[in-house]
Amino acid sequence: MTVPPIDPPPRLLMGPGPINADPRVLRAMSAPLVGQFDPVMTTYMNQVMELYRGVFRTTNEHTLLVDGTARAGIEAALVSLVEPGDRVLVPVFGRFGHLLTEIAERCGAEVHTIEVPWGEVFTPEQVEAAVVAVRPALVAVVQGDTSTTMCQPLADLGEICRRHDVLLYCDATASLGGNAFETDGWGIDLVTAGLQKCLGGPSGSAPTTISPRALAVIDARRHVEAGIRDSVDVAREGSGTPIRSNYLDLAQIMDYWGPRRLNHHTEATSMLYAAHECARLLVEEGLDEAVARHDLHGRAMLAGVQGLGLRVFGDVAHKMTNVVAVEIPAGVDGDGVRTRLLEDHDIEIGTSFGPLHGRVWRIGTMGFNARRAPVLTTLAALEQVLRGAGAEVTAGGGVGAALEVYA
Amino acid sequence: MTVPPIDPPPRLLMGPGPINADPRVLRAMSAPLVGQFDPVMTTYMNQVMELYRGVFRTTNEHTLLVDGTARAGIEAALVSLVEPGDRVLVPVFGRFGHLLTEIAERCGAEVHTIEVPWGEVFTPEQVEAAVVAVRPALVAVVQGDTSTTMCQPLADLGEICRRHDVLLYCDATASLGGNAFETDGWGIDLVTAGLQKCLGGPSGSAPTTISPRALAVIDARRHVEAGIRDSVDVAREGSGTPIRSNYLDLAQIMDYWGPRRLNHHTEATSMLYAAHECARLLVEEGLDEAVARHDLHGRAMLAGVQGLGLRVFGDVAHKMTNVVAVEIPAGVDGDGVRTRLLEDHDIEIGTSFGPLHGRVWRIGTMGFNARRAPVLTTLAALEQVLRGAGAEVTAGGGVGAALEVYA
């Protein structure tokens, strides 16, 4: 068998993520490796911690990377926080709420869910009523669920959880960097994310921040592996149920990132370089500025698809800035349109899950692609492909409406 | 805060890994991303499966990547195979045997260990006696344990395990690609590895191969998450204990890599590019040729350190090709020597764990660094630094002895 080197085509990735990584992030990954405990490496790790404190808007000391995709970050959070038998409340407003439920169940939690129809979000009162009824140890919620494009308001949820002495975990994978997020300001105890959405990097690293409240819970379950345990570790051993995972054990991961540099996994150096550059670019731009950029280009894309005569799914007032769900016009083959966009224009837009499968396309404007050219080019190509598919579209209506937003 | 872009120094990484990635692997990671289900991406995934069948020497259909470091691969194997309460036998001959024990315990296993002193390996008779005594569901063993540099012979273990109807899992992270490994020929049911040793890549992806015997066990525990489950999945639901992890659930990961392409994590595209290029280069070179190369440069390094007048730790007849443990001479500050090598020569060699901490250095010759120049340069620099540290060394003895091996 002879396999040629990879040679990917220059796709414009306008789906719900992954999107094109910033070329500076890709270049950072081709930098030479250094050793795991090289002072250069530990300096980069400390810089990553500081940079992601900026991204998460937090002073949490324990702000670090979990080596895996965003889903690894979610599971690290839940397996580290949830003791078997704990009650966990998951407000589900799309596919990724189901994922939190699934993962929490595998951690041994007794999971309670509340649901709203896809395309809606929860009011604080709905969440508080469920907290009162369920009395969970933890509320686990997604901020932006790309399956519906909805962005759950979180500002009140932290306060509700503190008042009822409940921990609050948030999966901010799809939203962080492109929608306002205030870890400390909103009182969120543990947050995880990924690089492949608004952060403009590849999938494979999960930025994570752990508050002192979450730390106390995790510390009580601390258990250092036998191969490297010393007297200090025996003294620190927690009284809680040991964490069921070794790889995703945040107590051990914190010790590896902390001053003791206790050996755990071998840090994925190239992914750390990528995560470093993603955050560096975002902090350099300014978080407020990055959110405003996503808001601008998201509004341009929204106006553009409406200007083409397409309908938008869901409660637009609670839409994430960085993705829009567009209803597939009656009689149009949704997958056929996606294929023509990919094959004729090198442009990818997204399909959907569950109840929205075959009903909507999802179009993203995030990270490196939250720029004018990707928005206008996607609208121009979409107009042509839709016309070819027999849909009624307003000639020039997409690009024209987007340009009005930019004017 | 202003953090500059990363700009790592050109280290020569001659420790037990991670080592320098092949520049072609680093360049592959800077290629542009494509979408998760783009036909280009799924073609790359299929190529990765085929390439790693070559690397693992197997016809196993389910040969794929776990998105995380080598440790993620280990945990995926154990959490997917081991049901809580299962007996697992771990022959421990170094630190990574303890790690298997630790992870299996967190999976709920009843773990039994046998141990040999660090620097030795097990005979087949020792393992078989323990299998008979313990009657485990699974034997979990490391092939090459870098903590001691020993390479456990495996050729007989597969046969023993089949005869006693026990599954055999092997962690080949440190050895694969540089030491003979025959997944099918030796009858090993599940094998995991990492890129950062003999495969010449960065840490962050765990090549994994799953035999039909292991598949049967995992299939019986199959459980597709609620958010994406359909009638086909309900029909395939296994009767065994559900796998405790979602992220590391090999049943779901196989469905993502298989023809159904069932959504699970978002594949870490850049790490997949790296893994693709690592295997491609190895298959192009030939596995036998790569093992012979590691053997040659490992023998040159061994002869070199002995030629300098240093003593080697452990049973050299069972040493891995790709790493040697060198006793720190009496009166020499081991960490001081490592610092001088790093600061004056940009060369990293390894320290040690547990009972060998402060007693030996570990010097690797693997992957991209299993070449003549890194071996000779390391020996030349080591001679100078040792002399500076007050050790008695034979002038020219290291490079001279290595050159004799090459002659």
Image (cartoon, coloured by chain):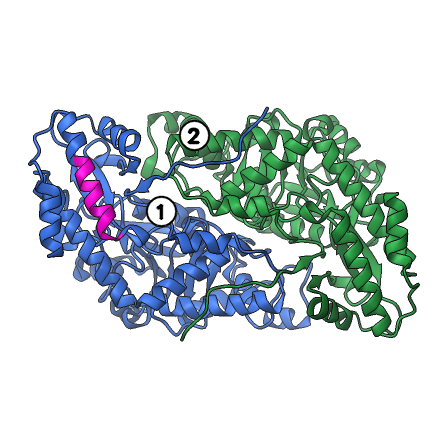
Chain colours: A green, B blue
| Residue type (three-letter) at the residue carrying disc 1 | Asn
User: Is residue B281 a member of the stretch shown in magenta?
Assistant: no
Query: Which is closer to the viewer, label 2 or label 1?
Result: 1
Q: Badge 1: few (under 14), some or many (20 or more) residues near its Cα, within 10 Å?
A: many
Name the quarter where the C terminus of chain B is drawn.
bottom left
Q: Identify the disc placed on residue B20.
A: 1
Name the quarter where the N terminus of chain B is drawn.
top right
Q: What secondary structure predominates along the stretch shown in magenta?
A: helix
Q: Nearer the viewer, residue B108 or B299?
A: B299
Classify mark 1: helix, strand or loop.
loop
For the residues bearing labels 2 and 1, Cβ distance under 8 angstroms: no
| Residue type (three-letter) at the residue carrying disc 2 | Glu
Q: Which residue is mark 2?
A: A237
Residue B367 picture location, percent across and down:
31, 54
Q: Chain of mark 2?
A: A
Q: Nearer the viewer, residue A213 or A372?
A: A372
Relative side of B387 to B170, left or right:
left
Question: Which residue is painted at 8% across and 43% down in the image?
Answer: B307
Q: Chain of mark 1?
A: B
- Figure check: B163 above or below A356: below
In this picture, which residue range is highlighted in magenta?
B370-382
Q: Identify the disc placed on residue B57.
A: none
Q: Nearer the viewer, residue B389 or A188?
A: B389
Q: CA distance from mark 2 to mark 1?
A: 36 Å
